[in-house]
Image (tube, grey):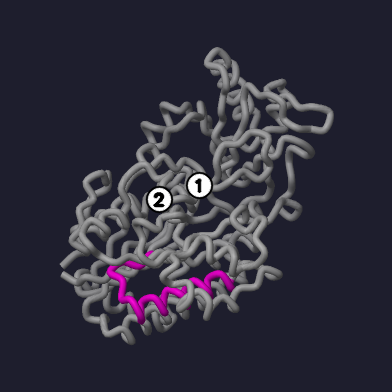
């Protein structure tokens, strides 16, 4: 059994991307020497921070407690993100590795911020709220990264980043360079890293656009950098590599500010300045779905009937209304919300409660853009999984798998115990 594992989660990678990515030198090498699962069923809502928690726990959102990208904060147009390791309500691969005395590294993996006591070499996902009030990039990274790697890893590479420009692909260049330096110097047993240039490109330009090629080719180069670092560290024969993804995307043409509709129906109160002063029903946008919170139990039936009526009308962006009980039974998601509404296939949902209720994609905020995710996992293009290394078979190809099964499989490869995991080991991929 090898004692090194590198997991690269390429945000929003789908099986169809392998038509190009699979011809690039590094991914081609992994496909030729490893195994492939074409379609991995993700969790719901199919959002980055929800799924990455599942990827490192093997649990669905009802058990992890991570039920959206952002916290439910009525009246806040920029709610804070779920991103701290101590928000995860079950054991992760990092905890399991710590118990076994293995060294671990997280480079921009969601929900690992603040995990200094669990993760040896930590470069967490840094959110916009983490940057607020900071004098410069150095201050942010000094606060949020492991002190052990600040001088020898962060400082030499910080110049790659530039706050004045788009975060992508400079964030990826920085994180992969840091991960490579950590591999060469410290040889951690577990490395989790999450490049998101593909996801960013899809949001900006659509599900399949000419711009996507650039992101896929860059992704192959970053994978190659990691493979080179493994070779340089002298651990090539003892290292397994997994290329995974969190979700697909669907094309969308408009963004729905669902709280505007709820305000019109009298469920949200505001003052003269437009600030929320009270609410009886409130929507938390989750991309191509939305979680609907109801403050008083006595209002649930009225809200449900209104939501169902809106779905039947066919103009509010809704194709289906799930009660909390239905959502838990079907998708393993539960929380303080009362309902989840699912997209009509071309509308996503934002949190705004003032202004236009329907915003065309070309005028929507970037985060909504021209394609999005958060939809039911059975819809649209699906994430693939590529595995390669001494513990994985060569040439195995499976049509279907489940994202919830990935962490138990990784645990098996490293000889870890993950007793809380709901997923199962993917035995068909293992030697």
Is residue 184 a member of the stretch shown in magenta? yes
Instruction: Tell me the element at label 2.
Output: helix
Q: Which label was assigned to residue 102?
A: none
Instruction: Tell me the element at label 1.
Output: loop
The residue stretch that appears in magenta: 169-192
Residue 393 seen in render: yes
Is residue 3 a member of the stretch shown in magenta? no
Residue 315 seen in render: no
Name the residue beneath numbered marker 2.
Answer: 53
Q: Main secondary structure of the magenta part?
A: helix
Q: CA distance from mark 1 to mark 2?
A: 10 Å
- In this rendering, the answer to whether 315 lies above or below 375 is above
Name, please, the residue furthest toward the right: 272
- Name the residue rendered at 32%, 62% in the picture: 37
Q: Closer to the observer: label 1 or label 2?
A: 1
Query: Is the residue marked by circle 2 packed among few (<14), some (14-19), or many (20+) residues within 10 Å?
Result: many
Residue 133 in percent (x, y) is at: 67, 56
């Amino acid at each position: 059994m090898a004692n090194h594992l590198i997991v690269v989660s390429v945000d929003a990678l789908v099986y169809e991307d392998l038509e190009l990515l699979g011809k690039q030198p590094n991914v081609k090498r992994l496909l030729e020497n490893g195994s492939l699962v074409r379609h991995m069923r993700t969790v719901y809502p199919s959002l980055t921070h929800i799924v990455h928690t599942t990827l490192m726990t093997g649990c669905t959102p009802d058990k992890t407690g991570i039920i959206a990208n952002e916290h439910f904060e009525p009246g806040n147009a920029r709610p804070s993100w779920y991103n701290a390791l101590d928000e995860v309500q079950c054991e992760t691969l990092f905890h399991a590795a710590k118990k076994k005395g293995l060294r671990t590294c997280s480079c921009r993996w969601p929900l690992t911020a603040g995990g200094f006591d669990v993760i040896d070499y930590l470069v967490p996902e840094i959110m916009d709220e983490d940057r607020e009030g900071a004098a410069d990039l150095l201050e942010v990274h000094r606060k949020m990264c492991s002190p052990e790697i600040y001088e020898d890893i962060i400082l030499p590479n910080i110049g790659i980043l530039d706050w004045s420009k788009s975060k992508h692909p400079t964030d990826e260049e920085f994180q992969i360079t840091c991960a490579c330096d950590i591999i060469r110097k410290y040889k951690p047993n577990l490395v989790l890293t999450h490049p998101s240039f593909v996801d960013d490109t899809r949001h900006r330009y659509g599900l399949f656009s000419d711009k996507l090629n650039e992101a896929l080719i860059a992704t192959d180069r970053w994978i190659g950098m990691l493979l080179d670092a493994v070779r340089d560290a002298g651990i090539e024969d003892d290292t397994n590599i997994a290329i995974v993804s969190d979700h697909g995307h669907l094309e969308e043409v408009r963004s729905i500010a669902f709280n505007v509709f709820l305000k019109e129906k009298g469920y949200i109160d505001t003052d003269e300045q437009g600030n929320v002063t009270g609410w009886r029903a409130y929507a938390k946008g989750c991309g191509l779905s939305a979680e609907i919170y109801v403050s008083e139990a006595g209002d649930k039936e009225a809200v449900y009937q209104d939501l169902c009526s809106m779905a039947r009308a066919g103009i509010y962006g809704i194709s289906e209304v799930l009660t909390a009980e239905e959502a838990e039974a079907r998708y393993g998601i539960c929380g303080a919300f009362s309902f989840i509404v699912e997209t009509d296939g071309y509308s996503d949902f934002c949190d705004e409660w003032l202004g236009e209720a329907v915003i065309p994609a070309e005028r929507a905020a970037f985060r909504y853009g021209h394609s999005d995710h958060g939809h039911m996992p059975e819809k649209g293009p699906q994430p693939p999984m590529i595995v390669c290394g001494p513990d994985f078979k060569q040439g195995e190809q499976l049509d279907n798998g489940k994202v919830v099964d990935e962490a138990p499989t990784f645990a098996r490869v490293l000889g870890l115990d993950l007793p809380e995991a709901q997923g199962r080991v993917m035995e068909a991929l293992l030697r």
